[in-house]
Image (spheres, rainbow, N blue to C red):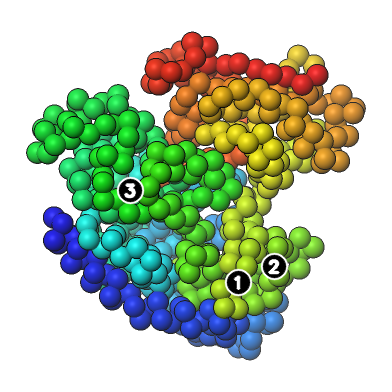
Amino acid sequence: MKLSATIANSLWATSSLPAWRRFRRALYDPAAAQQVWLREHLRRNANCEFARQHKLASMHGYEEFARRVPLMDYEQLEPWIKRIQQGEPRVLTTEPVTHLIPTSGSTKAHKLIPFTAGLQRNFDCAIGPWICDLARLHPGILGGPAYWSISPAIHPAVAESSQVPVGFADDANYLSGAKGWLVRAALVAPGGLAGNNDVETFRLETLRCLLRERELRLISVWHPSFLTLLLDALPLYWERLLAGLPNARQLERADPQQPETLWPNLRVISCWGDAHAELALNDLHRRFPNTTMQTKGLLATEAFVTIPFAGQHPLAVRSHFFEFVDEAGRIRLAHELCADETYEVIVTTSGGLWRYRLGDLVRVTGFVGATPSLRFLGRAGNVSNLCGEKLSETFVAGAIQLVAATLQQKPRFVLLAPEAVDHGWRYTLFLEGDGDLSAWAKPMEAQLRLNPNYEYCRQLGQLDALQACTIGSGAHEVFLRHEVTHGKRLGDVKTTFLSHRTDWAQQFLRNKLSGTPHSPSQPSSMFSTATLR
């Protein structure tokens, strides 16, 4: 397989060179690139029903576009998407919708995102430059196979009356034409694994595929905990995994506790590393100390927002049309963003999303050419507000990162969530990691009290003092299982620093009592607490 993977990787990288060159040029004039994209998008879709209702065919320039099309959430687009699902053509786009891609929603169990050949080309415009840049920096990845995350298709059933196919058989379908075929030729795990609805079976089969390939060069997953959970299963199922593998004798000399010994030629692991994923990335890097960790850009089912490129994460200016809402509520375009400012992302795509609120907050960390480089901060709508305290995920994330730096501790899992107490509510900080984490209570409470709304609720006695709760190993596993149980697709589960759920203590305890696997070094009691009074 190594030879065919090497050829496939080289052909893919070579075929992506034109996209790499065009993207690099566009970085120096994002205003022009975005203007061209919007003009072409309006021209191609002038005959769809959405364009007719909003009189887009007679429009001249961005200003008219912004006046005629309001900012939209999924709820405003859903009636249009239902028409597509029923088989009506030319609803949101002139181009046919080839698939409806399910993804989790903030206000509903799931959403269906239209996918077209044009959107597929848009994704190519981002993936091509990324893979070329990665190969330029790490040419060793071309010399062997890769593992790309393919999660089980666990999601709520979609009405059988849908006239449009729902979902993809495998993730390579995001790429067009020959590129998808080349990617499949270099993968260690077949796309058929995505159809397995049993999480444990999925993990075991994925691990078998990985263990067969000592020449593995690249691992590309979404959340780093997706990979660490796979690795946690290795010691537990080692003998079972080796059974039937053609290279079992060679693997017997490897140490399942040290994954770098299993894949000595692994060059790069690419995964999320911003916001809630940062702590999990630290844990993954500890397991692969000699492997390059590349933090992914901001990629959603709906759109490619940023890509890893030239050591930063510039906006994918050739893929979609972007607008940004600043903290004062004003709309800004890509070339108008300012360093160190925070914005909410608005996107228009070839799939039929028009001025769509993606719900993600980003901060400008620099520029590549004249194009802003963005860091994902968290979800715009994730605010906990039981008593008027208005704790946002971005504020909580900043507090956690500051306390971690102050205490010089890097927990593997951190989650702040409300809990009911006898006389009201309090927030509990659930922590998993090495060492004594009980010292987190005082500085974390101090950080939260910098929020005047939280401080006022504390003074009034509406909220009790924060509690720090140390959890035995396996928190990511419990979090993922709980979210999947409540209807989310495994690949759509995003761990966050802030949750609205009030039952996390019971969830962690219940999973401990029901026999969730834990490491031998785990304490006999799952919980230890330190409460600030």
Three-letter code, disc 2: Ala
Q: Residues within 10 Å of mark 1 (few under 14, many from 20)?
A: some
Judge whether 246 appears above or below 31 on screen: above
Q: Position of residue 197 (x, y in %)?
A: 31, 37
- At x 18%, y 67%, the residue is 7
Distance from Cα at disc 3 to Cα at disc 2: 35 Å
The part of the image, by quadrant, that contains residue 235 is top left
Q: Earlier in the sequence, mark 3 or mark 2?
A: 3
Please tell me whether mark 1 or mark 3 is closer to you in this view: 1
Instruction: Mark 1 and mark 3 in contact? Answer it, CB < 8 Å.
Output: no
In this rendering, position of residue 288 left or right of residue 297: left
Which mark is on residue 150? Answer: 3
Three-letter code, disc 1: Phe
Judge whether 246 appears above or below 521 on screen: below
- Front residue of 262/421: it is 262
- At x 9%, y 38%, the residue is 246
Camera sees residue 264: yes
Q: Earlier in the sequence, mark 2 or mark 1?
A: 2
Distance from Cα at disc 1 to Cα at disc 3: 32 Å
Which mark is on residue 339? Answer: 2
Judge whether 127 appears above or below 37 on screen: above
- At x 53%, y 75%, the residue is 317
Q: Position of residue 156 (x, y in %)?
A: 42, 41
Instruction: Mark 2 and mark 1 in contact? Answer it, CB < 8 Å.
Output: yes
Three-letter code, disc 3: Ile
Which mark is on residue 367? Answer: 1
| Element type at mark 3 | loop
